[in-house]
Image (cartoon, rainbow, N blue to C red):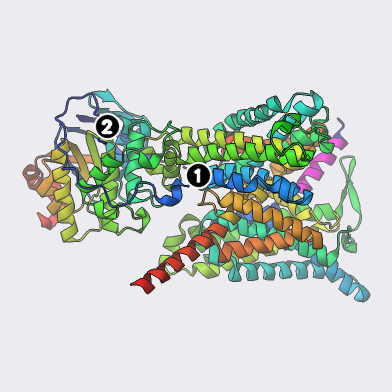
Amino acid sequence: MLEIHGLHKSFAGFRAVNDVSLTVESRQIVAVIGPNGAGKSTFFNLITGHLRPDGGRVVLGGRDITGLPPHRICGLGMGRSFQLTNIFPRLTVLQNVQAALLAHRKRGRDFWSRSELLFRDDAEALLRSIGLAAVAGAIAGTLAYGNQKQLELGIALASDPSVLLLDEPTAGMSAGETHETISLLQRIAEERSLTLLFTEHDMAVVFRVAQKIAVLYQGRKLAEGPPEAVRANPEVRRVYLGEHA
Amino acid sequence: MTVSLIAAQFLSGLTTAMFLFLIASGLSLVFGVMRVLNFAHGSFYMIGAYMTWQVMQWLQPAGASFWLAALAAGATVALLGGVVERLLLRHLYGQEELYQLLFTYALVLILGDAAKYIWGTGQLSVHRPPVLDGGFHLLGTTLPFYNLFIMLVGPAIAIGGGLLLSRSSAGRLLRAAAYDREMLGALGGNVGMLYTGMFVVSSFLAGLAGALITPIVSVVPGMDVQVIVQAFIVVVIGGLGSFWGTFWGAVIYGLTLSFGILAFPEFSLFSVFALMAVVLMVRPWGLFGRPIR
Amino acid sequence: MSIQLSRPPAARPPASRPPAGPPLARPALPAIRRVPWTLLVFLLLLPLPWIGSRYNTFLGTEIVIDALFAVSLNLLLGTTGLVSFGHVAYFGIGAYVCGILMKTYGVSFAIAFPAAGLGAAAFSVVFGYFCVRLTKIYFAMLTLAFSQIIWAVCFKWNAVTGGDQGIADVPFPNMHWMAAIPGAEQLSENGRFYLLTLTLVALSVAAIGQITRSPFGRMLTAIRDNRERAAFIGLNVRAYELAVFVVAGGFAGLSGALYGIFTRGVFPDYVFWPKSAEVMIMTILGGMSFFWGPPVGALVLVWLNQEITNYTQYWPFVLGTMLLVLLFALPGGVLGGIARLAGALQRRVARRDA
């Protein structure tokens, strides 16, 4: 479903991502882990088109998307949530999702309809499925952090992606919130047959959910494999997991 | 195209350049650190010019002292800047950048009319300090001593300012602030005092520039607007926030204007804005600015 | 009303949807949005030439024209978050195109007016293409630079634009046909021009309103709120910004055309940057987060200007002070202040009822 071949990126001589390859099968859940500065965010930005790779290829569903701008990649079925919550703060929760639906269904050139009336049912259904129905009318910027992250997910889902990239989906959450978020993610992935690629620092989450783990360290891929294999890998233990494993 | 003509244009352009550098440096610094583009910078310059004239009027019976007046003017404008920043501007920092810009524009309107009210609409002039009267011959043209003085003061401030920024602890704080305001605050740097100080220094430079221009140019309403536009162009060419960029931007602008008028007298108005547009289209961060994403 | 979720070509089993619950308890369109405001305002302002003095009609015409100019700016500012310092360029281009066509070439208003809009739109395509590649302060400065290039050209090109003298004696459009409208035959030329202006502006404002309400408009507000996110819901942000830049420029051109006729002349002043500042202040004075903010701002500013300049020459001082008050005490503008007041009153009533 998603193939990454030999991705490179340097910033002023510093190799942020160095020859990283990864294959994600359809409907797989893959985690990318690594210490801070390992290049995870850069790696994601290269896949989603926010940065141009210096070398390597990204292939989505058989189609080469390397170097395409973000809006094109989104249109081809890749969704993304961002580490720092990225929603439309002055719109209501419902309008946030409506906007994403309108964009996905290419209604941006419609000058005649009233935007509030389009796709209302679908937007409401989506909000119900992620548990935000109660705050549909609230201004997004006033929501609590956890709700904003849920909305972020909702916006990503509205584009009906086949692959979803999640940048630290449980960052800043309490144990309870993390549990809820992960359950939600698993349910959604199941319902929509999604392929998930996510980065995380919370190892408990990673080992609970991921079917495959890739470890990045100083821009390189250190290891890749099923959770148990990665956990047992001596290199990984030395560099990252330390005494937690 | 004689040597003397070229020399004359070159020297005239350089004088303009150094003078604009003096003004634009304050503008650029404030933008670099505080991310505020101060439209009122030209107004501060104008107040400096008027104050110089005023102080010289007061000192008249005792024997005019240009230098005293110039310093007094600079100090007055510095004070004005400090008051403006402390009492008013700082309340807008958290808000949209547009509001800060509009605030400085409001100052332009207010200060412009205040000057008109106090000093009227006529042209005022100030005599050159006698020690710098006269000029000397150079390459077939005459260079007034006063212009030479301006041409030296410019680089002097550049070198002084540049050294200050790279060597002193205050300078380090400034450069840190330019990179990351919030981090600086978190580290305990007193961002508030830094901003006020920055604004005061910038205002002083503007006021001083206004003072120093008075022997060459008449003091009239409208000089605020006329200079701010030129200062904008200079900082765009050099790169917003870069001290040395402002210097070279001023040189390029001054010489372009000087030789441009020679070649295309009809298009001088057009060409300076065209220059600004071209720079923004091709290399928006100017010669020395940081490339922006 | 159930809409099928669209699916990408790759075969995937249909997602199981949770059972549709009751619609979220909120009307899709609150009552206040269903009122045809533009029509109401139009009808309200219509009788002015009959019931008001010549002076009032004159003032009214200026307010209405400035209202359109400000609304067009707010398409950029309030709706899309684009701060343009050079919007006056398109106003001026519209004024010059219409003025030149009507005065120098004797073209009728019916052709000159749309030509002005198209001319302004054409320039905004070219300028806009370069401007939208930049953001924030750089975008603002390039819009300013382009507008002042236009100013310089208008100032210098004596042959076509009349140079610094401008073009005087721009004629009124032929309004004899208006005698057919009941009650209009007794009106002066100024009165008729007011009616014509009001109609054209109302239509334009209605069009802009529809654009703002449309899905296209929703995309613009998404871009305003979060450019990066907007790209990642699939929007080509630059293309949208260019599109709105052109639309805004076109309407500004129309307002400029009307202004040139209104003042019976077209001058380089119309493209000079303080006019950009003026229209921006109007927009913010009324409240840039409200569609009707700019027209309210135009009303207040023009009226204030007239009143104050009768007493003193220090209008800039008054304007500057007003701007300060606005920025510090009333950042949401007049409508923002009213909205806050209404909210506070509502809460007080709710508490009393509780």
Q: In the displayed structure, would residue C23 be above or below residue C167?
A: below
Q: Main secondary structure of the magenta part?
A: helix
- Rendered location of residue C112, percent (x, y): 70, 27
Is B176 placed left or right of A59 in the picture? right
Q: Chain of mark 1?
A: C
Q: Residue furthest right?
A: B61
Identify the residue position indicated by label 1 in the image.
C36
Between residue C190 and residue C254, name the one nearer to us: C190
Q: Are marks 2 and 1 on the same chain?
A: no
Looking at the rendered structure, the secondary structure element under dot 1 is: loop
Q: Which residue sits furthest bottom?
A: B62
Which quarter of the figure is the C terminus of chain A placed in? bottom left
> Could you say where residue A120 lies in the image, as x and y percent from the top left?
31, 41
**Displayed quadrant of residue B111:** bottom right
Instruction: State the extent of the magenta-drawn residues as a range.
Output: B4-17
Q: Is residue A39 part of the magenta span, yes or no?
A: no
Residue C263 visible:
no
Three-letter residue code for mark 2: Gly
Indicate the quadrant containing the N terminus of chain A: top left, top right, bottom left or bottom right: top left
Residue B110 versus residue A123: which sits nearer the camera? A123
Between tags 2 and 1, which lies in front? 1
Local secondary structure at mark 2: loop
Q: Residue C13 lies in what quarter of the image?
A: top left
Q: Is residue C179 above or below residue B153?
A: above
Identity of the amino acid at label 1? Pro
Q: Along the line of sight, which residue is nearer the eye, C32 or B205?
A: C32
Pointer 2 residue: A77
Cα separation, mark 2 vs mark 1, equals 40 Å
Place of residue C331 in the rendered image (x, y in percent of width and height, measured from the top left): 54, 60
